[in-house]
Image (tube, rainbow, N blue to C red):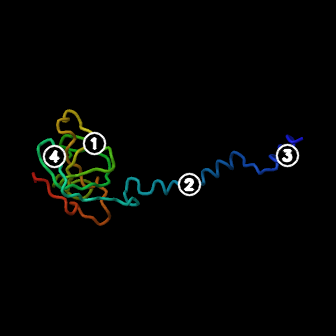
Amino acid sequence: MRATENTVRQDRRPRLGRLARTARGLAVMALAVPVLTSGLGTGTAHAATCVLEENVLQQDKLGNVFRTDVKCDNLTGDVYGRASFDSPVTGKKTSTLSTFVCWTRGQPHSGGNTVWYYGKGDTAVAPFTAYDGWGAMESNKLLVPAGTPHPFPGLPRCPWY
């Protein structure tokens, strides 16, 4: 008899049909998607962070020594041998938090200026692996806080300008 009572109780529960469950799930997703995707690709909803670090010691494969750097959120992309798109790609930035040791002027880019930042890529690109991924990345790849100018305040200009 207990089995029958359980069956009766289960039958009295309100049932959502497959269509109703799907609609409820889609409604929840519709509310969540704007929160999860806001600012993707634009940096607008993302609170960009950059930290200037002094008294550090970094050296590139050419023997240049750097004692100041900036650690910033960034977009992924190519690292060029010079501050120009016709320069060979020496590395790739695959992480979204990177260190840059100086800035230089170069070819205009979609960021609306000629500022490029010099740093080490996360991976080196053949046949330039001897440079260990060091090179320049256009300034619009750095996600600096709103109102922060390029070049980043306090970061030195590269010695080869």
Mark 3 or 4 closer to N-term? 3
Q: Which of 28 and 98 lies nearest the eye of the viewer?
A: 98
Query: What residue is rendered at 27% in x and 39% in y?
Result: 123
Residue 161 falls in which quadrant of the image? Answer: bottom left
**Image height of 118 relative to 130, above or below:** below
Q: Residue furthest right?
A: 1
Mark 1 or 4 closer to N-term? 4
Mark 2 or 3 closer to N-term? 3
Q: How crowded is mark 4: few (under 14 residues within 10 Å), some or many (20 or more)?
A: few
- Mark 4 residue type: Gln
User: Label 1, label 2: how many angstroms apart (C-alpha)?
Assistant: 36 Å
Percent position of residue 32, x then y: 53, 55
- Mark 2 residue type: Ala
User: Label 3, label 1: how many angstroms apart (C-alpha)?
Assistant: 63 Å
Residue occupied by mark 1: 122
- Mark 3 residue type: Val
Lateral position of residue 118 relative to residue 23, left or right: left
Mark 2 or 4 closer to N-term? 2
Residue occupied by mark 4: 59
Residue 133 falls in which quadrant of the image? Answer: top left
Percent position of residue 40, x then y: 41, 53
**Image height of 89 relative to 14, above or below:** above
- The N terminus sits in image quarter: top right
- Is there CB contact under 8 Å for labels 1 and 4? no
Residue occupied by mark 3: 8
Lateral position of residue 91 relative to residue 30, left or right: left
Please state which of the two labelled residues, at mark 2 or mark 4, is closer to the viewer: 4
